[in-house]
Amino acid sequence: MSGIGNILTATEPAVIRFGEVSKSFGERGRRHRVLDRVSFSVPKGKTTVIAGGSGQGKSVMLKLILGLLKPDSGQVLVGDRDVAAMGYRALQEVRMLFGVLFQGAALFDSLTVFENIALPLRERTKFSGEEIRQRVIATLEQLELAGHEDKFPAQLSGGMKKRVGLARALQLDPEIVLFDEPTTGLDPVMTREIYQLFTQTQQRLGYTAVIVSHDIPQVFTLADQIILLNKGELDVFTDASRIPYSTQPKIREFARQVMGQEAGEE
Amino acid sequence: MNQEQSPTPAILRFAGELGDRVLYILTDLGRMGIFLYFSLLGLCKPPFRFKELIKQVGFIGAGSITVIFFTALSSGMVLGLQGYYSLHKFGAEGMLGSAVSLTLIMELGPVLTALMVAGRAGSAMCAEIGIMRISEQIDALECMAIDPFRYFISPKFLAALISVPLLTAMFDVVGIFGGYLAGVKLMGVNGGAFFAGMEQSVTNHDLRLGVVKSFVFALLLVWICTGRGYFVQKIRGAGFGAESVSTVTTQAVVMSSIAVLIFDYLLTAVLL
């Protein structure tokens, strides 16, 4: 089998690389291939948007990066280490590089907002109780969540849950932050707020961002790099205006469907 | 030509499906085995979460006291009445204390306690973990490099191993009291004979058997109930979302109850 060097020839500093990754789901005889020999890299310090329709494998990519799923074939490199080949301890080390904002925020139902945000600090650092309290309160104020610290997730709106999820994801100063459908279920005002929050925090902390979204074309305004997926085909762009001129027919078809008929015909 | 070939695909299909099913069962057993290993390993990994342990002992143990009390009382009273009815035929009512206590300590106490705890706390544990799984809370823990076993599964194991034997002891005491009420107070058996018979017939070996059973049953029910919840998305035919949690919760209670009954026979056969 070809090594990652053969698959990925990019010389720019990349923090994540996919090399010919395939992944299928389903039971025997009814397996559905979601990713078919997919290769791309995520440049350091930049924002990569992974977009496509539902069921195209966008969230699967995030789970592969985090080692929550293993590819059927191919390699997923974080830095220069293959996530799929890692043992438990090494995987724990790699996961410390990441912050993740889940689609449903994945807040712990039985913990308050304060406890949810404090959790990674309590479990993964040696900070004193007072230091943790100060850090959490500072984060709550930055994300306009002050006054809500004693509420439980069930008492929060969708937008607030996302903000708490983002606050928790940023607590350990991650190098890479993964956003899984950060604006799903939010109204346009809240969506804009989440995007502003993203821009502010990224400018302040300088993390590499990977955003999985089907909020097209709005999410493209955040992107330094766009990865489009449709029916097993994948194309990478640095400029959203080039999407309709993709060499991949299924990507052009997707662009016509979601970005307007005129885009594909120009 | 086609007619000649038609039986072969059917046989192959059957063999394929059989093999697929066997592979699924083996995979599931392997998964559950690894789950048990990490759950027990989590008990040895500091820092220990005493607050979570106390919360779980409160939920599994203290929360089950009422149901255990009434189950034990009614079982003991029924045993007292049935025992009196049977022994009276042979003029051996004096053996009632012995019969009631031995039945409760070696069999009914551990088994019924485990079944009650599986129904009350086991189902809740399975549903809680299942919901945490489908709402990505467990994924979130793993992404924060927090070991979910040490964080919330191992404390449930330890809490069950502490609570179930204590509840079993309570069941035995309340059940014997129920037998005493029915046999002595209602049917007129001599109270002294009731307790003397119990004292003479119950040995340390009988008590040990009851204690061993209660520990094994505790491990079985917490393992199956938490394990099914943890793997809710990997269980074939369970469906998706809320439906999968409800299906798997029912399955967990049924499986743990059957496992308790099977192991009851095996332990009795080996240790008696």
Image (cartoon, rainbow, N blue to C red):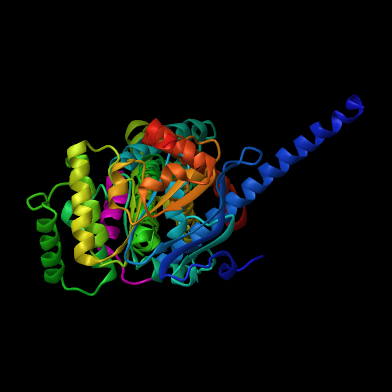
Give yes or no for residue B59 being in the magenta stretch: yes
Q: Seen from this angle, which residue lies furthest left?
A: A147
Image quarter (top left, top right, bottom left or bottom right) of the C terminus of chain B: bottom right
Q: Nearer the viewer, residue B121 or A218?
A: A218
Q: Residue B10 at what x, y percent from top left?
A: 80, 31
Residue bounds of the magenta highlight: B43-64
Q: Is residue B13 above or below residue A246?
A: above
* Residue B109 visible in the shown view: no
Q: Is residue B252 above or below residue B41?
A: above
Q: Is residue B136 left or right of residue B266?
A: left
Q: Seen from this angle, which residue lies furthest top?
A: B3
Quarter of the image holding residue B46?
Answer: bottom left
Q: Seen from this angle, which residue lies furthest front?
A: A266
Q: Majority secondary structure of the magenta segment?
A: helix
Q: Nearer the viewer, residue B39 or A210?
A: A210
Q: Is residue B160 left or right of residue B102?
A: left
Residue shown at the point (44%, 59%) measured from the top left: A65
